[in-house]
Image: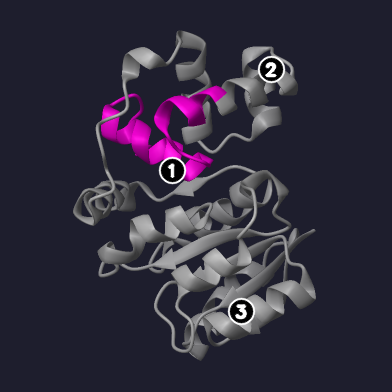
Amino acid sequence: MIRLLLVDDQELVRAGLGLILAAEGDLEVVGEAPDGRAGVEAARALAPDVVLMDMRMPVLDGIAATRELLGGPADEQPHRVLALTTFEDDDVLWGAIEAGAAGFVLKDAPAVDLVNAVRVTARGGSWLDPRVADRVLGSLRRSGDAGPAPSVDALTEREREVLRLVASGANNAEVAGSLYLSERTVKGHISAIFAKLGVRDRPAAIIRAYDAGIVTPRA
């Protein structure tokens, strides 16, 4: 069972998300919160597997709440944060990834995409709605943090294979199974990818890879 926390300042949005998610046999909504501060407190009290976090909220916004909740190393976090966003939120996209969000799902996404995003995130993968990828890149460039494009040549062919699977939402075990590698070897490849692309987690690596043309957003 995947335990979920819904954090959004709109009660109707929380109710709608709750109905969609509760209809799935492997998903359980264990709590709700109307702002980022209450969301952080609820996450610490309830220990959900995935926090669906709105980016625009009073008291504490989604970026600040995500940063506060995920302050330690990415591999040691008890929670995974899936950012809820709209097409109007371009200016917060890269900030949410830098704060540690595992990915984005649009509020108007089909129910099947929302459910898939939650499941991928819960099992350790990353979900970036293909409609958001270009906007995240634009937000990154406008933020002034883009820096030089990562060098495609710096990645080995095996590392590119691993990165393409990571971009598809695969976790370490799934990458290992696809490439007939041990999980330890996969972790080594992912660490090398992070170092070469100058990032600290999967979503940022995927975005940098999109920027360099190593992978393309899934359709």
Mark 1 surroundings within 10 Å by alpha-carbon count, few (fewer than 14), some (14 through 19), many (20 or more): many
Q: Distance between the Cα atoms at labels 3 and 2?
A: 36 Å
State the count of labels. Answer: 3
| Lateral position of residue 25 relative to residue 192, left or right | right
Q: Name the residue under label 2.
A: 185
Q: Which residues make up the magenta segment?
A: 192-219
Q: Which mark is residue 39?
A: 3
Picture residue at 38% right of the left edge, 60% below the top: 95
Residue 129 can be seen in this image: yes
Hey, what amino acid is under mark 2?
A: Thr
In the image, residue 85 lies in the stretch drawn in magenta: no
Magenta stretch, main secondary structure class: helix
Looking at the image, tell me whether mark 1 or mark 2 is earlier in sequence order: 2
| Lateral position of residue 101 relative to residue 28, left or right | left
Using the image, determine if residue 171 lies above or below residue 158.
Answer: below
Q: Where is residue 53 in the image (x, y as percent from the top left)?
A: 52, 70
Picture residue at 77% right of the left edge, 68% below the top: 47
Hey, what amino acid is under mark 1?
A: Ala
Q: Where is residue 218 in the image (x, y as percent from the top left)?
A: 38, 37
| Lateral position of residue 106 relative to residue 20, left or right | left
Q: Tag 1's secondary structure?
A: helix
Q: Residue 204 carries which label?
A: 1
Picture residue at 69% right of the left edge, 14% below the top: 181
